[in-house]
Image: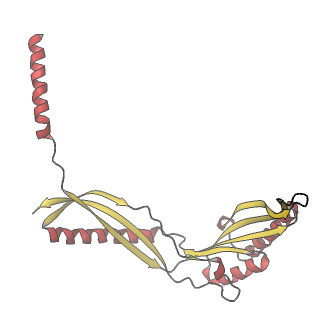
Amino acid sequence: MTFIKMNLLTIGLIACLQGPALAEAPVPQFSVSGTGTVADAPDMATITLGVTYNEPTAGEALKQMRAGSAAVFASLERFEIEARDMQTSQLQVTPQWERYKIRSSGAEGQKISSYLASNLLTVRVRDLDRLGEILDAVSDSGANRFHGLSFGFAEPGPLMDKARDAAMKDALRKAKIMAEATGVKLGRVLTMNEAGRQPRPEMLQAESFSRDAMPVASGEVSLTAHFTITYELLNE
């Protein structure tokens, strides 16, 4: 038993001494980033609008807001906008406060002066040829707040794939230039990561919704992909 223990101890010591020598050397590598952008004419617009009423009582404010919202929905039905393309959010009733002076003490107090009832409605418009008409209609029917208009794509996937392809080609182009300049050779791809950036079409702000200048020129929308690729480096 003592002989077996001595042999096992000797084997363990040899393994410990050889461990660093047997460890793999770090793989020479470098990372490069690539960006690809694809632009095309959009086929969809998203309108964010609101209905807001300020009344002496909460009940009256809600009543007016419901009536205004119903009128907006009715105006949208004329354009055959589907239910899936309309979403209501941020329905709220909030008291509005005003300051006053207390006669007996001269100190300032606060009291509720009115109630503000409001909601937001997000509408996707798939027929851009009628966008101007729709903006006019919702304005006339009771929408009194506009939070912006953005243009985009109903199916952005194929365009994003083109942007990704361009981003990877851009990264490879940069990698080849760097490798040639430094006298090394590109090996296999070790890692490939896509950044978490999402396409964000430019918004037209609320002040753009004047009655004499409805924003109906959609132009082009750009989608951008961004990749970081790590390559193995080989000696020439």
The picture quadrant where one finds residue 189 is: bottom left
Residue 185 placement, left or right of 97: left
Residue found farthest to the top:
1
Q: Quadrant of the N terminus?
A: top left
Residue 64, position as x, y percentages in the image: 84, 68
- Residue closest to the far right: 104
What residue is rendered at 64% in x and 82% in y?
208
Q: How is the image coloured?
A: secondary structure
Would you place residue 211 above or below residue 8 in this image?
A: below
Q: Residue furthest front?
A: 105
- In the image, 129 versus 46, the foreground residue is 46
148 shown above or below 2: below
- Residue 23, position as x, y percentages in the image: 15, 41
Frontmost residue, 158 versus 232: 232
Q: Residue at x 85, y 64 (%)?
A: 100
Q: What is the quadrant of residue 12 in the picture?
A: top left
In the image, taking residue 149 as reference, residue 162 lies left or right, namely left
In the image: residue 12, left or right of residue 160:
left
Is residue 217 in sight in this rendering? yes
Residue at image point 18% right, 67% down: 179
Q: In this orientation, does residue 114 appear?
A: no
**Could you tell me which residue is drawn at 61 percent across and 76 percent down?**
149
Question: x, y percentage for residue 77?
Answer: 74, 73
* Residue 66 on image: x %, y %: 81, 65
